[in-house]
Image (spheres, grey):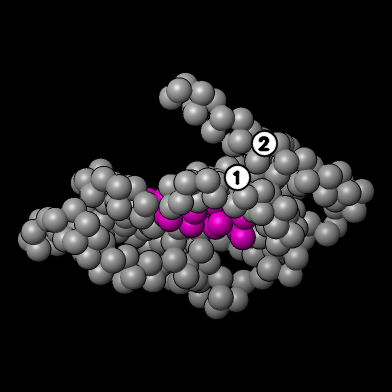
Amino acid sequence: MVRTSKDMIMRRQSVVFLIALSLRGVVYLMVMGTPQVIQQPDSVVYLSVSENLLTHGAYYPTEGRTSAFMVRSPLYPLLVASVMGLFGGSLLGVVLVQVWLDSITCVMIYYLAEKIKKGTGLLSGLLAAAHLGMVTYSHFILNDSFFVFGFVGVLLGMVYVLEKGSLRSVAYLGAASGCAVLIRPVAAYLPFFLAPLLMGALMVRHRQSLLWAAGKVAVMIGAFTLLFFPGWVTTNGILGVSD
């Protein structure tokens, strides 16, 4: 019975992934004919940084250098640079990776929905697979698809904490939140919301003491800081010297 249930879950996840990948694949084939649509107004900063990383090994834009650049998170330009390096500088290669990443996000949404309420995973996954915004933005040189992937990872971390309440679960939640900030800076607000929610969940749901719950919140904040702070300072703080 358990084996049958696991097989059904795997089949449903596969259906969600294949539908998501197929829909994005159709759009990808259309984009191949007009690759100029890949670049949006904000793409110039990401591409400029990525090209500089490939050419000079420096995290710095040659174009689109404005005050807004100083609050750009570094992980997406690093991803773009890595993929461009593998695909010989092809932006279509970057989009292809984003298409796969976005399809995986749909499977994560399936899993998240199942954790929240049994039986809702397939519908949630299919809605994500067919979501026009997700399908469209996975074909732009923008960090939206990557951020949704990271943010769903944070939501899964919250569910993990509610289920387990362990040190490992709160450390994962903090690390996932830190990674989310390195994709998009707005996620820097997450700890302010997560800390009281985590404290309440540990004390009420898991019947843990105030001191023990506070210690786990500190672990979450510590994991967040370890992931977020070094990368942010390295790629944004130092760059202000030559401004």
Is residue 200 visible from the viewing direction of this image?
yes
Quadrant hosting residue 155: bottom left
What residue sits 61% from the left and 36% below the top? 12
Q: Which mark is residue 88?
A: none
The answer to if 186 sits in the magenta stretch is no
Q: CA distance from mark 2 to mark 1?
A: 9 Å
Determine whether, in the image, residue 188 is placed left or right of residue 46: left
> Residue 140 placed where, x, y %?
73, 57
Q: Amino acid at mark 1?
A: Leu
Q: Nearer the viewer, mark 2 or mark 1?
A: 1
The residue positioned 45% from the left and 23% from the top of the image is: 1
The quadrant holding residue 194 is bottom left
CB of mark 2 within 8 Å of CB of mark 1?
yes
Residue marked by disc 2: 15
Q: Earlier in the sequence, mark 2 or mark 1?
A: 2
Q: What's the mark number on residue 122?
A: 1
Identify the magenta region: 143-157
Q: Secondary structure at mark 1?
A: helix
